[in-house]
Image (cartoon, rainbow, N blue to C red):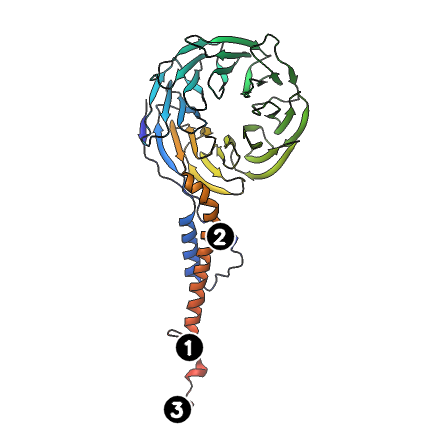
Amino acid sequence: MGTVSSVETHSISGRDLHLLPWLNLQFARPIHVALFVTLAATSGLAPLAWAYRTGNYSWAVAVSHDGNYVIAGSDDIHTYFFDAKSGEGTPKWSHAAPAYVRHVAVSGNGARAVASDVNGNIFFFRSDLSGEPVWTYQANSTINSLAMSYDGDYVVAGDRLGSVYLLVADGPHPTVHERVIPNGVLSLSLSEPGALAVTSSGGGLYFFTELASESGYAWVFQSYTSFPQVAISDDANYIVAGGSDGHVYRLDRSGQLVDRDKLGGSVSALSLSSSSGRLVAGSTNGNVSLYEVGDGLKALSSLRRLRPITSTAISREGDRISIADLDGVISMFGGSLTTPLWSFEAGAIVHSISMADNGLVLAASCDNGNIYLFKEQEQKRTSEATTGILIAPAVVAGLLFLYWFWRRRMKNGTGKPYDRRESSHSGEAP
């Protein structure tokens, strides 16, 4: 089990100073220092609500679409379920599994949740039942990927041997439909109509229009690479995949390659916005790109980190983007990777991050066993653009006025510079 801990928040300091190349500060070092300190004080703090320490590595976390609930899995063989509306940071309930819990998922409103352990057990929960699974299903091998439909009625899972499971959550026992792809399952993604994209460890992306049917997969896309990451649009009209070759691929519903873009390294994280059609992808060489997925892949912004990207998340409207890297740094951005909002140093590898639809709630799970919850206020979110645009220039204007006043005082008032011409004895009356 675990404990609640207090963690200091971190901020991005003085990030607005690059906006002031025209300000000559060589004559006003005190103002330079004051300006830096003032801008650092007004930059965003990571809105950490709480941190909960489990008894071992924490590999997986998921936030409900409404941001009210969080589920996490740990190598202390427990699944933890939290009420994100509570500020206490203690689990609402937990469940002990026979083995390490490495994958979790939750429904849109948090009423249903699912977890899997490395022994191949899949546990289906109702959040109001204090951690007792409604049912448990034993897969053929270790589960490599797990997902749940928005309403929680369907669970899909893929195991190490290549079995793909659709479990219909109707009562005390699931209805199970099983399909098989060559080699093991790497990743899978479920659309709202029930279409499923699955990638294989042996290479290839498999598309199922309906797992409950007996027809098997509709098509397979093959390339000279495997696809560790995959995401399908809500309407199943397109699929994006991240390749070991460092490319991001965009396919249409029929399996035709529409576009691809070179990210570099191997694509290690990928998240698709369910409404805006925006995609964020990160790679093992530290590259991150934000795309607009339309007729192709249009790169909107990018950045480079020194360490591999371990996880990404994006809000439904694409106006909140988060990334985590191998150094344990979690960063939040606005609608572009060039607009940082806050960052947080977790002190350990961040294995997974998950975001609510509105982007105001973010959870993270880490190698040190910590589960972090970050919560922003709606008012702060709606006003942050105004804050960034108005407050910093106002501070600069105020400091410039003080500098102008000081220079004027030096010339015309007390403390003005010594001038030998004015101090010479002319013999004239004052």
- Tell which tag, 1 or 2, sits nearer the viewer: 2
Per the image, the residue denoted by label 2 is: 17
Label located before the other in sequence (3 or 2):
2
Res 77 quadrant in image:
top left
Is residue 412 toward the left or the right of residue 166 in the image? left
Marks 1 and 3 sit apart, C-alpha to C-alpha, by: 20 Å
Secondary structure category for the residue under label 3: loop
Per the image, the residue denoted by label 3 is: 429
User: In x, y percent, where is residue 396?
Assistant: 46, 57
Label located before the other in sequence (1 or 3):
1
User: In x, y percent, where is residue 9?
Assistant: 37, 39
Q: Is residue 141 above or below residue 294?
A: above
Query: Can residue 284 be seen from the camera position used here?
Result: no
Residue at image x 48%, y 30%? 357
Quarter of the rendering occupied by the N terminus = top left
Per the image, the residue denoted by label 1 is: 418
Marks 1 and 2 sit apart, C-alpha to C-alpha, by: 34 Å
Res 407 quadrant in image:
bottom left
Q: Are marks 3 and 2 in contact (CB under 8 Å)?
A: no
Q: Is residue 330 above or below residue 1?
A: below
Res 360 quadrant in image:
top left
Label 3 CA crowd tier, 10 Å (few <14, some 14–19, many 20+): few
Label located before the other in sequence (1 or 2):
2
User: In x, y percent, where is residue 85?
Assistant: 36, 30
Q: Amino acid at mark 3?
A: Ala
Q: Amino acid at mark 1?
A: Tyr
- Tell which tag, 1 or 3, sits nearer the viewer: 3
Q: In this orientation, which residue lies closer to the viewer: 113 or 90? A: 113
Labelled disc at residue 141: none
Secondary structure category for the residue under label 2: helix
Q: Are marks 1 and 3 in contact (CB under 8 Å)?
A: no
